[in-house]
Image (spheres, rainbow, N blue to C red):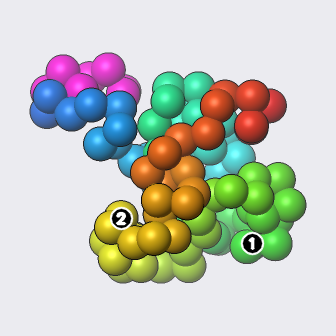
Amino acid sequence: HIAYIRERTGATLEEIVLVGDSFHDATVAAGNGIGFVAKAGTFGVAAWKERFPYVVVVSELREIPPLLNSEKARESSVVKPPSPDTYA
């Protein structure tokens, strides 16, 4: 899916952010070198922070656009994905 998005849009890995609600989604993002935002629901904020302490967690999707240019994003995996080992 990531390759398809890159091919169709010309986006770089640094420009792609996956929004997901499962730990698997976070692992996929890290494995592909893209940013990730966790959507609380399947797992609550505490579960996300315990397993992936550097991931930004949102409760509602409308919280994402302001995050993309924020200081919080630059300090987290939203903009700069951690190494795949972070989520191993």
Secondary structure mostly seen in the magenta stretch: helix
Q: Is residue 2 above or below residue 70?
A: above
Q: Quadrant of the N terminus?
A: top left
Q: Residues within 10 Å of mark 2 (few under 14, many from 20)?
A: some
Q: Earlier in the sequence, mark 2 or mark 1?
A: 1
Magenta range: 1-8
Of badges 2 and 1, nearer the viewer stands 2
Please tell me which residue is depicted at 35% across the width and 38% down the height of the picture. 14
Please tell me which residue is depicted at 47% across the width and 79% down the height of the picture. 60
Question: Residue 62 has which mark?
Answer: none
Magenta stretch: residue 6 in it? yes
Residue lying at the far left of the rendered structure: 9
Q: Quadrant of residue 28?
A: top right
Amino acid type, callout 2? Leu
Amino acid type, callout 1? Gly
Judge left or right: residue 6 versus residue 84: left
Q: Secondary structure at mark 1?
A: loop
Q: How many marks?
A: 2
Q: Secondary structure at mark 2?
A: loop
Let me know if residue 86 appears in the view.
yes
Image spot of residue 61 (x, y percent): 41, 73
Tell me the residue that label 2 is attached to: 68
Judge left or right: residue 10 versus residue 88: left
